[in-house]
Image: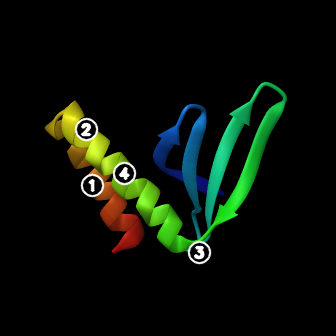
Amino acid sequence: MLYRVSPVGEARDLYATLYAQRIFFLVTIQPRGATFEVIPLMDARHYAEQNLARSRRDGPETLKRWRELFDQTFI
């Protein structure tokens, strides 16, 4: 099972495994299905940090939610 760590871009999201939490996937939704790409921890953290920076512009509630998920996943 996977859980969403952060949005990455247009039709792309970062997911982690629910059990091991150290295996990360970039999931791209396409008209003909989804593609999964395994990425390293540091790349996943970079994408999540970019999401935090975007969330700062969206307001404190959004930032708080993403910050909690970031801390759970990477700290």
**Comes first in the chain, label 1 or label 2:** 2
Tell me what residue is drawn at x 63 percent, y 52 percent.
26
Q: Nearer the viewer, residue 21 or 63?
A: 63
Tell me what residue is drawn at x 43 percent, y 61 percent.
46
Can you tell which mark lies on residue 20?
Answer: 3
The CA span between labels 2 and 4 is: 14 Å
Tell me which amino acid carries mark 1: Arg
Tell me the residue that label 2 is attached to: 62
Q: Nearer the viewer, residue 20 or 58?
A: 58
**Comes first in the chain, label 1 or label 4:** 4
Which mark lies nearer to you, 2 or 4? Answer: 4
Helix, strand or loop under label 1: helix
Q: How many numbered discs sit on the rendered protein? A: 4
Tell me which amino acid carries mark 4: Gln
Tag 1 and tag 2, C-beta contact below 8 Å: no
Which mark lies nearer to you, 1 or 3? Answer: 1
Tag 1 and tag 3, C-beta contact below 8 Å: no
**Comes first in the chain, label 2 or label 4:** 4
Tell me which amino acid carries mark 3: Ala
Q: Is the residue 65 above or below the residue 39 in the image?
A: above
Q: Nearer the viewer, residue 62 or 44?
A: 44
Residue 53 in the figure: left or right of residue 46: left
Which class describes the residues within 10 Å of circle 1: few (<14), some (14-19), or many (20+)?
Answer: some
Tell me the residue that label 4 is attached to: 50
Give coordinates of residue 3: x percent, y percent.
Answer: 55, 53
The CA span between labels 1 and 2 is: 9 Å
Give coordinates of residue 40: x percent, y percent.
Answer: 59, 71
Tell me what residue is drawn at x 20 percent, y 42 percent.
56
Residue 12 in the figure: left or right of residue 49: right
Helix, strand or loop under label 4: helix
Tell me the residue that label 1 is attached to: 67
Give coordinates of residue 19: x percent, y percent.
Answer: 59, 70
